[in-house]
Image (cartoon, rainbow, N blue to C red):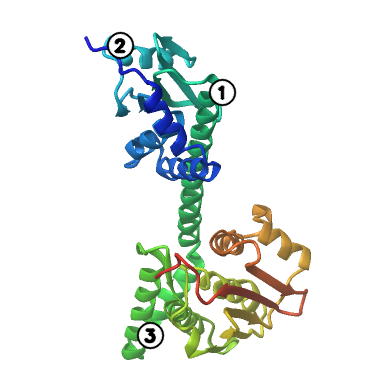
């Protein structure tokens, strides 16, 4: 049996001097928040326990996940059954104390997330503040993880929005050209394979304007084969924006929307204009059609993600752009009934962390 080390005047002075400066305390608290971004099972939990020990000037600090596994900094007294103490907290979700060891539950969104164990004399107010810090850090980590999962789900939803009607028509056209024009049939079949590969294959989170425009041109080539003279296309992109990194699959849904809801609804067809250019530090891409147009109120519902208004493609793209670049970016829709539709996407030409 070992006797827990006494805090002692000298040791207490060392710790308190180190963290007496408010800026130093905030810096340590920031590191705790970053270290717990992946929760109590993440790779930086040990670093978090060391920082918490500094904040509390404690002899030992441990964090336990829901399995009871401990990550320790410093030392805990051997005459205290820490594992049992943690197990009691996990089952009761309430604080437990034995001698100078305190086990504090960490409750995140009304659910037990883990246990904080502290050894040595610690002020109740300090323990309360550190517990609140840990709960906030774990809440932030969960929110960030949820945001990433939501973004992935929205990307999967965009992939799933490939129109069966378009697929059927494209393959029908290809099949009809096999005998009279085998070279054209082969060309369109390769375009179709390229379109499916880009739309469904696993990609990173970001791509380039060049790749998105290539996907757009492939899609439009197939639609021109299906619609014939009813669809006219003009695509222009400035060389200086080709290398701009953007979220994957943000432009293709805009073009698909212009064709499906703008041009196909008109017997006489129409023209789709796609333009990419630099405006100062921004890259501005517009997709415009002279098709059926829509009620501006309907356009607002589409951007709001109203399922009754139609597909979720525009709302997904708008949310993803705002999540990546901030609330000042996203989609702008200009439309009116029988007056066509123009959708504009504006993104920074350079954004930290956005790399294809």
- The answer to whether 347 is drawn above or below residue 185 in the figure is above
Does residue 118 appear left or right of residue 151 in this picture?
left
* Disc on the earlier residue, 3 or 1: 1
Q: Which residue is mark 3?
A: 177
Q: Is there a contact, CB below 8 Å, between mark 3 and mark 1?
A: no
Q: Which residue is mark 2?
A: 81
Q: Position of residue 336 (x, y in %)?
A: 77, 74
Q: Which residue is mark 1?
A: 125
Residue 71 visible in the picture? no
The answer for how far apart the CA atoms under marks 2 and 1 are is 25 Å
Of circles 2 and 1, which is in front?
A: 1
Instruction: Out of 265 and 303, give the one closest to the viewer.
Output: 303
Name the quadrant of the N terminus.
top left
- The answer to whether 143 is drawn above or below residue 224 in the figure is above
- The answer to whether 97 is drawn above or below residue 271 in the figure is above
Secondary structure type for disc 3: helix
Report crowding for label 1: few under 14, some 14 to 19, many 20 or more residues within 10 A (C-alpha). Answer: few
Of circles 3 and 1, which is in front?
A: 1
**Residue found 68% across the figure and 54% down from its top:** 308
- The answer to whether 348 is drawn above or below residue 270 in the figure is above
* Disc on the earlier residue, 2 or 1: 2
Q: Position of residue 277 (x, y in %)?
A: 57, 86
Secondary structure type for disc 2: loop
Of circles 2 and 3, which is in front?
A: 2
Does residue 230 appear left or right of residue 24 in this picture?
right
Instruction: Out of 21 and 183, give the one closest to the viewer.
Output: 21
**Residue found 51% across the figure and 84% down from its top:** 224
Residue 318 visible in the picture? yes
Instruction: Out of 28 and 224, give the one closest to the viewer.
Output: 28
**Residue found 51% across the figure and 32% down from its top:** 135
Secondary structure type for disc 1: helix
């Amino acid at each position: 049996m070992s006797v827990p080390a006494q805090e002692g005047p000298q040791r207490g002075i060392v710790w308190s001097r180190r963290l007496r400066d408010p800026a130093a305390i905030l810096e340590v608290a920031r590191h705790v928040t970053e270290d717990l971004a992946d929760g109590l099972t993440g790779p930086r939990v040990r670093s978090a326990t060391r920082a918490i020990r500094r904040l509390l000037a404690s002899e030992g600090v441990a964090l336990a996940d829901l399995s009871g596994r401990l990550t320790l900094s410093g030392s805990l007294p051997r005459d205290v059954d820490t594992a049992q103490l943690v197990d009691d907290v996990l089952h009761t979700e309430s604080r437990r104390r034995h001698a100078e060891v305190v086990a504090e539950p960490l409750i995140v969104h009304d659910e037990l997330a883990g246990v904080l164990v502290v050894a040595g004399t610690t002020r109740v107010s300090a323990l309360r503040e550190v517990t609140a810090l840990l709960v906030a850090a774990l809440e932030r980590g969960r929110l960030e993880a949820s945001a990433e999962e939501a973004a992935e789900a929205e990307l999967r939803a965009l992939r799933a929005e490939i129109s069966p009607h378009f697929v059927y028509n494209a393959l029908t056209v290809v099949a009809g050209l096999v005998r009279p024009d085998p070279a054209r049939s082969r060309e369109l079949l390769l375009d179709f394979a390229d379109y499916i590969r880009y739309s469904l294959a696993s990609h990173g989170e970001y791509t380039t304007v060049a790749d998105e425009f290539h996907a757009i041109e492939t899609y439009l080539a197939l639609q021109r084969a299906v619609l014939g003279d009813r669809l006219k296309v003009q695509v222009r992109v400035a060389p200086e924006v080709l290398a701009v990194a953007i979220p994957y699959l943000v432009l293709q849904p805009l073009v698909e929307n212009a064709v499906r809801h703008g041009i196909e609804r008109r017997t006489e067809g129409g023209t789709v204009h796609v333009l990419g250019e630099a405006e100062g530090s921004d890259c501005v891409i517009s997709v415009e059609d002279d098709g059926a147009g829509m009620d501006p109120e309907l356009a607002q519902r589409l951007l709001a993600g109203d399922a009754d208004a139609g597909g979720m493609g525009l709302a997904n793209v708008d949310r993803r752009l705002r999540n990546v670049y901030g609330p000042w970016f996203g989609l702008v829709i200009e439309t009116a009934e029988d007056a066509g539709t123009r959708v504009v996407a504006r993104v920074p030409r350079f954004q930290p962390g956005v790399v294809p």
